[in-house]
Image (spheres, rainbow, N blue to C red):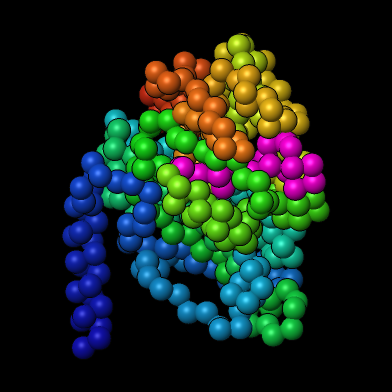
Amino acid sequence: SSTASRDAAMVSDTVREKNELADISWDNLGFGLVPTDYMYVTKCTKGGDFSKGELQRFGNIELSPSSGVLNYGQGLFEGLKAYRKEDGSILLFRPEENASRMIMGAERMCMPSPTVEQFVEAVKLTVLANKRWVPPVGKGSLYIRPLLMGSGAVLGLAPSPEYTFLIYVSPVGNYFKEGLAPINLVVENDFHRATPGGTGGVKTIGNYASVLKAQSAAKAKGYSDVLYLDSVHKKYLEEVSSCNVFLVKGKTISTPAIKGTILPGITRKSIIDVARSQGFQVEERLISVEELLEADEVFCTGTAVVVSPVGSITYLGKRISYGESGVGVVSQQLYTSLTSLQMGLTEDKMGWTVEL
Ligand code: COI
């Protein structure tokens, strides 16, 4: 009977989930999807509130062909990570920051959003349900991907009548194929990521589809990724396709100021605070592309990329090199400080981690 087969399925789930770790090769994780056990799903109507969602087996979802997200890009995503500690507990990093950013983005994209509490609770529930997929200490992290989308049917351009908030997870290792070795960027001169008044400052899905062409062209030429300039003056640094950028010169660290076209990264914000706590002067300001020539070090930050040292940047055919001898001292120091805190190896004086 269907009841018996459902019971059998539940028993085998329970047996499987007793295993502390999933049976995968933890040493070769890159940044690709590894399907896990459960995803969190909840829906609401336009003008409504999200009710408490539920865990479902991870798998495909059903969407109207005329859903707002598929037709008009009414969608947002978030990204955060969970690390396993030596004692078996699990640490989340600043999940309430992702919740707040989703609320801001939802406002810009005319979508309802879960409250901070709902978001954080949903993240915790999803991570615990997929606990065996959190990599062992030192082998990576569990990447958590919350999605908010217009799932109801529309035809004319309008906000969707129904919304879905979903969270899935995947164990991940290093984002760039270079691993922790410095990456090589190229400054993009023809395409721009964002425009003033546009959506560059929120994590809407369209910001990421629109960089694929420049990113693919750069990868075909052997670069790791693209560094974007502002679309008005074609002169000031903005960000890389999937991360923010920082320049180091002596004891001063600079990063482009948030002004609507730059994604307010949580790793960006955290690195600014960590650097200040270590005596660096941190400036958020306009940074001319010419300043790349004078920097001692350049690094990128993001949830996926963590702190990624930059080995070279090519601008108008000229290659500017940094730290030919490997990872820059400041980049290395900030990487170590941040990841030690995220992994629970050092005391979290900032109060940023949430233990599960
Ligand atoms: C992240 O760093 O979490 C992001 O959302 C960037 C994404 C392109 C992987």
**In which quadrant of the rendered view does residue 340 lie?**
top left
Quarter of the C terminus within the rendering: top left
Report whether 287 appears left or right of 326.
Answer: right
Where is 214 relative to 284, above or below?
below
**Residue at figure coordinates x 56%, y 53% from the top left:** 214
Q: What residue is shown at x 54% (from left), y 21% (from top)?
A: 297
Q: Is residue 122 above or below residue 355?
A: below
Query: Which quarter shows the N terminus?
Result: bottom left
Given residues 171 and 218, the one toward you in this image is: 218
Is residue 80 visible in the rendered image? The answer is no
Q: Which residues are magenta?
A: 223-241
Nearer to us in this view, 64 or 128: 64
Q: Is residue 86 left or right of residue 259?
A: left
Q: Position of residue 24 (x, y in %)?
A: 21, 51
Asked where in the image residue 52 lies, by quadrant, the reply is bottom right
Residue plotted at (36% across, 43% down):
177
Relative placement, left or right, of 5 versus 306 is left
Who's the residue at 72% across and 30% down the image? Answer: 288
Left or right: residue 252 compared with residue 330: right
